[in-house]
Amino acid sequence: MSDTVSLGEFEFDCGESIPDLTVAYETYGEFTGDNAVLVCHALTGSQHVAGRRRRGDTAGQAAAWWDDIVGPGKAVDTNDYFVVCANVPGSCYGSSGPPSEGPDGEPWGTRFPAVTVGDWTRAQRLLLDELGVPNLHAVVGGSVGGMNALDWAKRHPDHVDRVLAVATGARLDAQCLAIESIARRAITTDPDWQGGDYYGDGPDPVQGLALARQLGHVMYLSKSSMAKKFGRRSAGMDAARDAFELDPAAGFFPYREVESYLDYNGERFAERFDANAYLYLTRAMDSYDLAGGYESDSDALAAFDGEALVVSFTGDWHFTTEQGEELAEAFRATGTRSAHHVVESDHGHDAFLVEPEHVGPPLGDFLDSGVRGHAVSDTVERDEGDDFAPVHTSLFSS
Amino acid sequence: MSDTVSLGEFEFDCGESIPDLTVAYETYGEFTGDNAVLVCHALTGSQHVAGRRRRGDTAGQAAAWWDDIVGPGKAVDTNDYFVVCANVPGSCYGSSGPPSEGPDGEPWGTRFPAVTVGDWTRAQRLLLDELGVPNLHAVVGGSVGGMNALDWAKRHPDHVDRVLAVATGARLDAQCLAIESIARRAITTDPDWQGGDYYGDGPDPVQGLALARQLGHVMYLSKSSMAKKFGRRSAGMDAARDAFELDPAAGFFPYREVESYLDYNGERFAERFDANAYLYLTRAMDSYDLAGGYESDSDALAAFDGEALVVSFTGDWHFTTEQGEELAEAFRATGTRSAHHVVESDHGHDAFLVEPEHVGPPLGDFLDSGVRGHAVSDTVERDEGDDFAPVHTSLFSS
């Protein structure tokens, strides 16, 4: 089911409040008391995690982004689990955020308080209370959604049994911070952004938002996946070359497939997403630091006594396998039963979305059986006498 | 010495001509008949390759970019060699290009013909004729300057004895094409770009150009160099945060060192470089393909019977060591005496500029002794009986 709920006055980490936080969410399956799984969406995702075929869905703006993973008989089996996914505050798919209506009947715009991943976690906690779900069997998320999942282990260690952190890390590195900050500048230098107050009759800052998204696409793909997918090929004659004003010298040079891909996807994204929301959500991602308020990552995770699965992808340079391993080390240091499952892939960061055949099995088995799950591997070789995690590689042990 | 020369009517690869091509150049050392070394600058470099301490230099806009490598007693020793470096057509340091004056007394702007690396090579050939230099002992270049050097081996195989291709490749890959095309869109969407006609009283497209440069900086550094250089640290209280309009939520979040670095360098770059020139030169780089007009890279290099040194850097993701090895393979396939010298470095693409202690020795020794040069290593293990290249690693042989 798809619904919205009013959670009343909400104070954000930044200290500012809004009188009534609305959260748009979807649920799948039946709650039986101990089978709730919270799914956390990535930066530009929505609550519409699965169920592609349904019509007239209010969240149809963002495609069912994990439909290959979540559903009846799938890895996250909605015959067994009660799956909840909520659009995060600050986003634009029905939850309160910059484009939603403020108390004066006008869009909040940049008057909306700054949001953090911690705010998302607190809003999700309130939503689960509304739904009568005191404890989660598991929380799972990819990319910044993985940070959101980690934040649950940190803030609500007693309310989560299993954490699945996919294609994520404890914090962004300097390179990704740089790219995100350039993406924000592409939006704020678009004259149509107008200081964030573009909700009237004038044009939206579509070009700035499209450029920001194009940078995202480069970050989500890998060098080798781009080489295979596009190479240096020219786009077909019918490829539209009108998304951006061109430098006149362009006429002498080919319009390449990779440009066509970026232009097409940038434009489509600008139609479905709000520029201010993009600024807010990237700020939340950039500022997230698992160790924040603690001595270290493992200190932040110390109170968590469930099981943890970290999944990373060899071709991912947004969140690298090294960052995944650091995260796994933090769990290990607390004595948490954990595994770091590394997927060989050259799909880059997108792998967690586009390789369900490699992502589904470890996720499904971990949900059912924890680190003992058959398809769950780990980077650390364990002793024979160890009573869990029988499948191992040792990528990081040398 | 620093000078400009008029080379008369010049027809570009695109088929358009200008009535008088001006080339700004510098020379260092004395020409003795067989000691000429052409240095090819990178994308935003200038003819001012060395001699940092000279005053009143017309090319002072771009710092002497290889002063640690070129000069008396240095790796490219101007006591021995006659070094020539020319600003490429399409650039903005004194050679004809978009900001230079056209026949009507107005800046060319985007009426300037599209330029290619091949045009650069032909302009350099004409310049050398003017200077009375029929043959080159060597041509050396880094990044797109390395493509320029390769182009010499392809177009003037009988006029060059040694080619030094540093931090370069036979062509850009899809990922770099993507980033360059986003950078161009950042310029052309800047309203101050005005279709390229911004040379009047109005503002220049400084924000678009600064954004393009920021993307360049990310591409020129490496993930690990950025982590070490900036990490996630906040910039000091005195760091200017006024280069770009900020999203209001920024007030809650730190202004980081990496942002400060990008903003500072983006602004400085926009002061010294021309936005249209940036469009033109990236187009030239993007379109360069060593194999163009031939069956393959090695076919393009087949007529060259000098010696070749390819230098690549392990942390470089703009031009990878794999691309360097492909280039070296192309030379090997033609039977050219060649070596691929791989430098261990996490400085990224910038390494060829900022690690003179690692770049100078193989360059200097290769200039003097070819692939037999003491400091020249190769990725290929050779037979004992082989009469050259005694130092080897075998990075790529497994």
Image (cartoon, coloured by chain):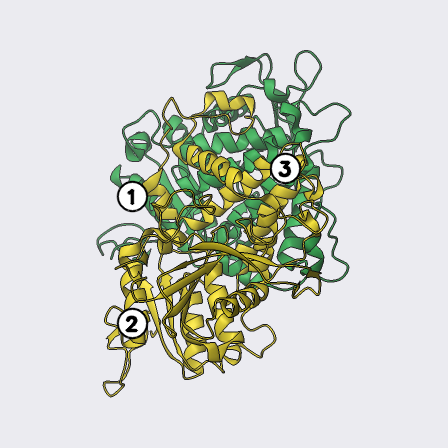
Chain colours: A yellow, B green
Residue at screen point 52% across, 37% down: A271
- Can residue B33 be seen here? The reply is no
Mark seen at residue B209: 3
Do discs 2 and 1 share a chain? no
Task: Determine crowd level at label 1: few under 14, some 14-19, many 20+ residues with C-alpha closer than 10 A.
Answer: some
Numbered disc 1: secondary structure: helix
Q: Measure the C-alpha gap from mark 2 to mark 1.
A: 51 Å
Picture coordinates of residue A175, whole percent (x, y): 53, 56
Residue A139, above or below B358: below
Task: Determine crowd level at label 3: few under 14, some 14-19, many 20+ residues with C-alpha closer than 10 A.
Answer: many
> Taking A392 as reference, is A211 left or right?
right
Mark seen at residue B329: 1
Residue located beneath label 2 in the image: A368
State which quadrant residue A392 falls in. bottom left
Residue at screen point 39% across, 63% down: A83
Chain for numbered disc 1: B
For the N terminus of chain A, the quadrant is bottom left
Residue B333, above or below B341: above
Numbered disc 2: secondary structure: helix
Chain for numbered disc 2: A
State which quadrant residue A291 falls in. bottom right
